[in-house]
Image (cartoon, rainbow, N blue to C red):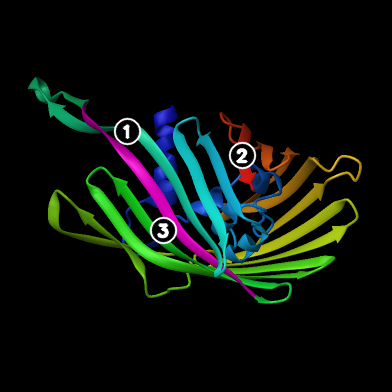
Amino acid sequence: MKKYLTIIFIILFSGLILAADALYLPNLGSSARMIALGNIDGFSRSSNAIFENPACLYRINNYSASIFATKLFDEVSYKSLSFGVRTDYGVFALGYMAAEVSGIPHTGLAISGNNNRSFFVDYYFKYDNWLAKLGHQLTLFENVYIGTALNYYENSMDGYKGRGFNMDTGAFLDWQPVQISVVFKNIMYFSDLYYSNKDDPEYSGVEHFPFQTVVTGIYNWGDFNILAQVKRTSDQPKLLKSLGLHYSPWFLKLFNLYGGYKEYYSLQNISNVYTIGVGLDLFDVEFNYAYEKSDHFEFDNNSYFSLSINF
């Protein structure tokens, strides 16, 4: 059953279909903190901002590293790693994100006497989808920050492999108590993900990168941060909305509580889910946990952990 769900995951999110739109991995979440807030971009305080809005890298004081790993459907290994450093020429960051499934059976058909048919496993292969990012952030004016990120994508499944480049750009306005994050992802509309097949030199395929616009508003109200976001993707007809709430009590600033609501596409329909989470800041080390209740009949309780180090 799990292998069947894995194959469904691959078909839904990254099938090798001519003129399709490629999966944008950061949509799955870059940290437990982000997931707990309803997958809201632009609120990260560490190097994983490179997956959300590169302009938010301005929050890095010196160095920052972030690690996030989990399993989807108990089969898909999902991870993200990032590192950022502040220099005299702005903040630079590197990011790596991947989703991987191994042990997928490739079956063959055997026909015996009396036309009896049976299937057998010929070999096993791996599905691999990964993204590498190089980001840079500059301070444009006081409390106005801009950032860009260069993206390299690589997808492979059995003998098929796709490669491509694209770019994100964003801005962040810190006008306390209001903050505004705006990011445009995959802005190079002329750049595609091109596929080849090692077993068929004549094969060629292409996937388009989905252009995405994400606008987030944050309002600071005492110990609370209230977040609201709208997201529009070129391959989807409607806006997706997210809401988040962050509470850090004045008497215990190292403790954080998160709550979130997000909308997402399930095939052609919009579904929604609520999330909660907790975080702990111990000097320069940040631990975060998120819980998400889904409507999946077998994997309906999802927990996520992430670690960030800022120094």
Q: Which residue is mark 1?
A: 104
Gap in angstroms between the C-alphas marked 1 and 2: 30 Å
Q: Assess whether residue 129 is covered by the magenta stretch.
A: yes
User: Does residue 200 appear anywhere in the picture?
Assistant: yes
* The magenta segment: 121-139
Question: Which of these two is toward me, 48 or 189?
Answer: 48
Q: Nearer the viewer, mark 1 or mark 2?
A: 2
Above or below, comparing residue 28 to residue 233 in the picture: above
x, y percent for residue 42: 66, 60
- Of labels 3 and 2, earlier in sequence is 3
What residue lies at 60% left-to-right and 45% top-to-bottom? Answer: 31
Q: Nearer the viewer, mark 3 or mark 2?
A: 2
Is residue 153 toward the left or the right of residue 78 in the image? Answer: left
User: Which mark is on residue 178?
Assistant: none
x, y percent for residue 226: 81, 56
Q: Which residue is mark 3?
A: 22
- Furthest residue to the left? 113
Tell whether label 2 touches label 3 (CB within 8 Å): no
Q: Assess whether residue 208 is covered by the magenta stretch.
A: no
Tell whether label 2 touches label 1 (CB within 8 Å): no
Tell whether label 3 touches label 1 (CB within 8 Å): no
User: Which mark is on residue 307?
Assistant: 2
Of the residues shown, which amino acid type is indicated by label 3? Ala
Badge 2 element: strand
Of the residues shown, which amino acid type is indicated by label 2? Leu
